[in-house]
Amino acid sequence: MDSINSPFKKKFPQKPQNFDKTKNLLRLTNTKFSPFFPLLFVFLFSFVLLSAGSFSLPLIDRDEPRFAQAAREMMERKNFVVPFFNGEFRLDKPPLIYWLMVLSYKLLGINEFSARLPSILSCSILAVILYCIAYRYSPSVRLIVPISFCFSLQTLLHGRLATADMAMTLFVTTAQWAFLNLLNQKSWFWFSIFWISLALGFLAKGPISWLIPLFTFILFRFVFWRKQKAIPSLHLIPGLLLCLSIISLWALPALIETKGLFWKIGIGEHVIRRGMEAFDNRPFIPFYYFISPFLSLFPSSAFFGLFIETLRKKWSMENAFFLSWFLAPIIIFSFYATELPHYIMPGFPAYFLVTGQGINEAKKTKFSLLFALLLLVVFFLFSLFLVSLYPFYGIILNHPLKNVLLSIGLVILLLCLFGGAMMLYGHNLSSRTAPFLMMATNYIALIYVLNFLAKDLRCLSLTVKIAPLFKNMPLASQNCAWGYTEPSLVFYSNRLWTWDPPLAPVLPPYFSLRLETETSLFKTLPWPLDEKNHPRSTYKNDSALGTPLPVQASQGEGRIEGLNLGRMSWVKIDFSYHY
């Protein structure tokens, strides 16, 4: 069987030589470099889309500022073994993502985009890998697989966040790709890729990068494809030695320097304890991971019926592997007490690889078409509802969240239109010009809307508003916060903070802030039909809500309100400082 890496081996027919300028231009694409042109296109497609808004969007509490600041402190301390945050050990995650952020900081300086660049690059490389795998199974729609992956809600969100999730997903996908190749051939190249990917995945986010391939193999070998060929040439002993030797280059010094705390906290608390106890007292929702993918994968979740049909009609060793890959993280985290939608993201690439095959089918069943149409219509109506609220919140109330609601509605609307273009693309196999034009239009419009949304969120961010006051903050100042203890304070001030101390500082220099009120965003949005609760005058003259505080004198106090995006709340705080 041909290698799944076939796009690099396929030979393109040469055009006849002539002096016509148009044909000479076409001949340029038939060189030995031509197989790399679509790979470059996919990479740039993903990179530009995920970069939209990443420059201006403030770091979202609580994870993004922790990762970004830990990388900064790693660079400042020149300690690349043990991460620190706010002057204390940060042993939640292994250091790979911090190393990548440090490189980004060295190249681009310390800012929001450079903190997010490793995730954006990881997602863009992942899109290229999906193109390569799709080339083997559905070559006529090989571009649709990475494009639909980039347009999914979870990718649009986590593909740009300054966290370790996308890097881990990349290495899990690379390991699965290598495993799939090893099912078909013995290759030291794919053997090396497999075990090195597992090592890098562990350095990105710990043992979950091993559990997902392991459960994939168990489901594949003992449930969905119980045949002798289902055992690849993994060379277990030399492979484990290679993998563990790479990890030990960091793990042994880290365990020695922290006296075993890295294992106790990183594995004991953040892996085992989160599996037994819900993090932050989150409620446990039965079958959560059988429901959340319909939102995370939207608009491609509309093709879930097509996913089922493709598995039924095209059952093969490879599709059995894709199904095992998709289900592995769902099964693992279904027994996990802490439930977050992005936990199962490493299984999403398999979903797009299967649906890509189904889109290429000429005949679709009524079930798959009706299911897709129903889900797209529901989200389409919801997006129209959000957009229709703009006159009420924008003109009547002048609510500070008016532009945010409008932008979110437009994003969902554009994703619905992309889903419609996908349906048209799969329905009309003879002419696909119109669907591609629709996708291109949605792509450009989505970039514009995401930039607009990010700028508006930045204007409303509470931490960004008070950031100018941090510029004159002495290094030796006492910085205390009560109630509002968000990590973004540490990143945007680049100073050490004390959370909820028993006594307030009295001698300068100091900076203190105290939470006055915190209200859920849903409670700040009055229902249009409820005239009794319309605060019509509350936001009439509040144009200063989006204005950062100016750099003031060495002493001052005041009150400010703004958005805490991480907690989805509207916050008012009192602050005082004396330098």
Image: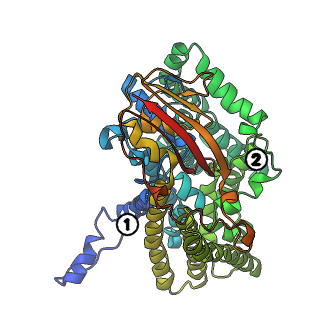
- Specify the amino acid type for callout 2: Ile
Asked which quadrant contains residue 152, the reply is: bottom right
Which is more toward the observer, 557 or 287?
557
Badge 1 element: loop
What's the residue at 55%, 55% (across, down)?
157
Residue 107 placement (x, y as % from top left): 30, 41
Q: Is residue 528 visible?
A: yes
- The residue at the point 72 percent across, 34 percent down is 274
For the question of whether residue 164 can be seen, the reply is no
Q: Amino acid at mark 1?
A: Lys
Circle 1 crowding by C-alpha within 10 Å: few under 14, some 14–19, many from 20: few
Mark seen at residue 11: 1
Is 172 in front, or is 138? 172
> Residue 218 appears at what percent x and percent y?
73, 43
Q: Position of residue 213 (x, y in %)?
A: 64, 43
> In this rendering, is residue 114 above or below 92?
below
**Label 2 with label 1: CB-CB less than 8 Å:** no
Q: CA distance from mark 2 to mark 1?
A: 41 Å
Quarter occupied by the C terminus: top left
Up the image or down, 273 lies above or below 518; here it is above
Q: Residues within 10 Å of mark 2 (few under 14, many from 20)?
A: some
Residue position for label 2? 331
- SS state under label 2: helix
Which residue ends up furthest to the right in the rendered image? 286
Colour scheme of the rendered structure: rainbow
Question: Which quadrant of the figure contains the N terminus?
Answer: bottom right
The residue drawn where x is 61% and y is 77% is 388
Residue 356 horizontal side relative to residue 77, left or right: right
241 or 261: nearer the eye?
A: 261
Say if 529 sits above or below 291 in the image.
below
Q: Position of residue 277 (x, y in %)?
A: 77, 34
The disc, 2 or 1, on the residue closer to the chain's N-terminal end is 1
